[in-house]
Amino acid sequence: MPSLFDDDAIDATPTLAWPLFFALYPDAETVECLERLFEDLRKRFGLNGSAVQNFHMTLFQPGPQSRLMRDEVAAALEAGDRLRAAPFEVLLDEVATLPNTRPKPPIVLRARNGLPAWLHFQQRLGRAAVEAGAVRTMPRYAPHLTLAYDKHRLGPIEVEPIRWTVRSFALVRSHAGEGVHEPLRQWDLHNAGGEL
């Protein structure tokens, strides 16, 4: 696999998609809860698909995703370095299929009453990304966690709340179609973190 910063590899494959995104990953205990939830849904509704390999919540994607260049990656890393924030809680309590034209659309877990802390964090990271030049405008991305892709359409269905405390965020490169998330950098959140 070529290095992310291998200029020859980048220049030789101008159409290679290397999706890059900021994400939140649940802790191991929460992953177990998510797996149990999916198994329950699979049995109740006859789902044919399998759970996704990397449970996460995407915050947003910086830069163009069709051709990843060194300066765009550097700007995204700078945005992460700029942010100082405290840990916050995520609570998800509703399952639904997102409207999609795919044969197997995503089944997601989301919050019925919204996620103000998540949105506040996304806005702060988005502001840092604008200042670093990683994005041109403030990102808008609805909070959700994908459980699976399946032909069955579900929901919205209220479920037992799944919650965890977010203590870090990451900039990740996704190897499309391979189910691999390659973390480029992770940042811890600290209680002493102040507003930008």
Image (spheres, rainbow, N blue to C red):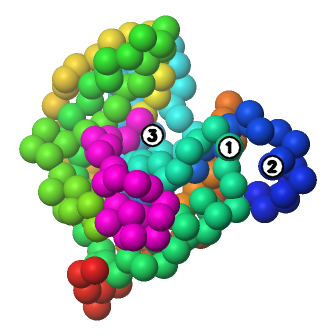
Question: Which numbered disc flags the more N-terminal residue, 3 or 1?
Answer: 3
Which residue corresponds to the image point at 53% horizontal and 64% vertical from the top-left? 76
Residue found at the far bottom of this picture: 192
Mark 3 or 2 closer to N-term?
A: 2
Q: Is residue 169 visible?
A: no
Compared to residue 72, the image places residue 114 above or below, namely above
Cα distance between the residues tagged 2 and 1 = 8 Å
Badge 3 vs badge 2, beta-carbon distance below 8 Å? no
| Place of residue 101 in the rendered image (x, y in percent of width and height, measured from the top left) | 42, 11
How many residues crowd around disc 1 within 10 Å: few (fewer than 14), some, or many (20 or more)? some
- Between 54 and 65, the residue placed more toward the observer is 65
Q: Which residue is mark 1?
A: 67
Q: Which residue is mark 3?
A: 35
Q: From the top left corner, tell me how far across and down residue 192 is, in percent.
A: 28, 91
Residue at the outermost left position = 113
Callout 1: SS: loop
- Please rate how many residues cluster around mark 2, counting C-alpha atoms within 10 Å: few if below 14, some from 14 to 19, many from 20: some
**Disc 3 and disc 1: Cα gap in Å?**
34 Å
Q: Which residue is mark 2?
A: 10
In depth, the one of 131 and 57 nearer the eye is 131
**Would residue 32 appear left or right of 164 to someone viewing this image?**
right
Q: CA distance from mark 3 to mark 2?
A: 37 Å
Question: Which residue is pictured at 77% across the width and 39% down the height?
Answer: 14
At 41% across and 36% down in the image, what residue appears? 146
As for residue 132 lying within the magenta part, the answer is yes
Query: What kind of residue is marked 2?
Result: Ile
Q: Residue at x 76, y 58 (%)?
A: 4
Q: Which residues are magenta?
A: 126-146
* Amino acid bearing label 3: Glu
